[in-house]
Image: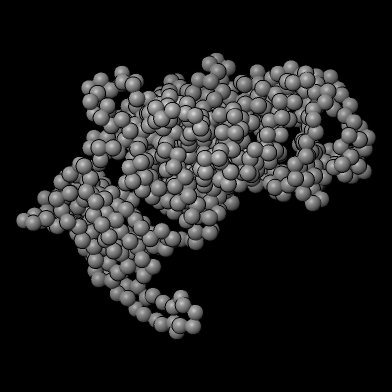
Amino acid sequence: MYHSKKQKKNNGSLILMVMVFVFTVNLSCKNEGEMATDETRTVSAVEERQDIERIEPLNWWVGFKNKNLQLLVKHPNISEYSPEIEYNGVNLVKVNKADSPNYLFLDLEILETASPGKFNIVFKKENEAELVQTYELKSREKSAEDYVGFDSSDAVYLITPDRFANGNPDNDIVESLNEKTIDRSDDYARHGGDIKGIINHLDYISDLGFTAIWSSPLLTNDMPQGSYHGYAMTDFYEIDPRFGTLEEYLELSSEMSQKGMKLIMDQVANHCGLEHWWMKDLPFNDWINHQDNYIDNLANWDNSKSITTSHRRTTNQDFYASKIDRDKMSEGWFVSSMPDMNQRNPFMAKYTIQNSIWWIEMANLGGIRQDTYPYPDKDFMSEWAGEIMNEYPNFNIVGEEWTSNPLLIAYWQQGHPNKDGYKSNLKSPMDFAMQETIIKGLNNNEDWSSGLIEIYKGLANDFAYVSPKDLMVFPDNHDMSRIFTQLGGDIAKTKMALGYVLTMPRIPQIYYGTEILMEDFDKPGDHGLVRSDFPGGWEGDAINAFTGEGLSEAQKDMQSFLKKALNYRKTSPAIHDGETVHFVPENGVYVLFRIKGEEIVVHIMNKNEEPVELDLNRFDEIGLNGKTIFNIITGESFVWGDNLLLTEKGSTLLTTKQN
């Protein structure tokens, strides 16, 4: 087991496991011209013991660029003990005491000479029995360069796991956790979806054409209510048992890798849940922001609103912002049930960085989605992203910045020449601005300044970005009304939005259920309803979207549309990183081209209710005249000539490449 924190000392009666590790190490001298030698190293027997209440990270690995490791040790009055480590290649550099006597933070140096294996950390105190904690250094399963993150060649399927599929009903209720009920009739209760449910339907997701999955957080959320969404984490090293086990999470990652898919983990650096284990005994007096206020108001904390954030995220970039406004934004709590973690505390900062690296290495991640990106201390976020990208140069992180202002999005992207000198180290901000623009452009009437021209101008703002194709765009997500609802139940407009998202220079993300026109018309934007159950994910469901049983013709048609578009996109260099050329919309028609080599992809958005003839001579510079063109969705073909008759409103996807 990786987790030892709940194992207790049994009054001196210890379960001993004796293991002898013999390593034959072929040491090749690194300096050019030196002779290589063979050496056999025998590591003495390790008497495994787990006396300490909690130690995090749960384990570590050899071979990182950063040789420093900081262990959080929690145990009653552990600050009165002196730790010792004897293991080749591991140095105990410094012992840091916290404000609480129940913590120590141990600074270790993991040298290149350290071998994978287990060793004991011995805690000594005069006239007291020694406390012994066995710790493990693992070997890395692959090189850092082989951790390849998602990019513009991927299409990401976003899942709220509690609402996707219940693969194991036996884990629906866990009596040791605060929220113990399952109620599918309540949009804000737990419904029972889990990791096994995702594993069971990987073929469905892969066959649709998705190459990556981002699920809402799967870590333990031991809050008394609303725990299904996962964003108020109460243990950063534990999979919520109602979702499954660490082993199942690793199984999900492994099976996805075998299918050529990438697992993106949703992480939260800004806050934790009020029921997090450390809230009962905070290590330092500044471990969380507004800690004094929290301690003073414990008796009626649910009514305390005085320290919540202002949500005025522009203070991160505003030259003229007052200090009080900046502090209220970055130090305020997201809500009164989510304590705001203080990353200016160096131990908290190190803890958060190491936690992210631990999950990348443990679960073979293909990316991280970082929640509420502008809310933590922005200098820390630069350090956090920088540390990860330094260890994993081909990795990727997407950060949530909910704004309609492209200038604010551009500020957070790596390499942007910010006037304040800020370097974000973040490759992929989320493009909320384009999402909002697509909705407005499709819903607004066509005239000189509104309609499709709004979408055109939105894409024209790409001059502000260092790398537009590395932004993540989406028609909707788990925090907003469904795209079908936002577009008034108009299927043609929905296809236009999806077609555009899948062909423009971006990383597309599609929310589960979009393929079957899931909606929230009863209460638009209501989070519980937006995150409705995927039909067929529960035994006995009358409709099964995985098999198509019970779906309407319109739902099946949308499923087919997305499947064909996504599977074409999967092997399209022109869409992945080709040149982009678009033409100012005219007469309710907007045409976008993606070009690479002999492959040219065309996306046409047509808002006309009646048939309209498109003059193709206007696009002569693209060089399509006389070429055979194939419709990606229908498979039909024609020769590009002078005119093209658009018979109905909607999205037309064309290519020079025969499927």
| Residue 216 in the figure: left or right of residue 306 | right
Q: Position of residue 48 (x, y in %)?
A: 23, 60
Place residue 17 in its image quadrant.
bottom left
- The residue under the point 23% across, 62% down is 85
- The residue under the point 53% across, 16% down is 523
- The residue under the point 48% across, 36% down is 373
Is residue 630 placed above or below 605 in the rendered structure?
below
| Residue 517 in the figure: left or right of residue 97 | right
Between residue 610 and residue 561, name the one nearer to us.
610
Q: Position of residue 256 (x, y in %)?
A: 54, 49
Q: Position of residue 454 (x, y in %)?
A: 71, 25
Give the mark count.
0
Between residue 188 and residue 184, name the one nearer to us.
188
The reply to whether residue 155 is in sight is no
Is residue 532 placed above or below 383 in the rendered structure?
above
- The residue under the point 48% across, 55% down is 390
Place residue 492 in its image quadrant.
top right
Q: Position of residue 176 (x, y in %)?
A: 28, 34
Outermost residue, left side: 127
The reply to whether residue 60 is in sight is yes
User: Which color scheme does this rendered protein use?
Assistant: one colour
Outermost residue, top side: 522
Is residue 257 placed above or below 244 in the rendered structure?
below
Between residue 405 and residue 560, name the one nearer to us.
405
Between residue 159 and residue 346, name the one nearer to us.
346
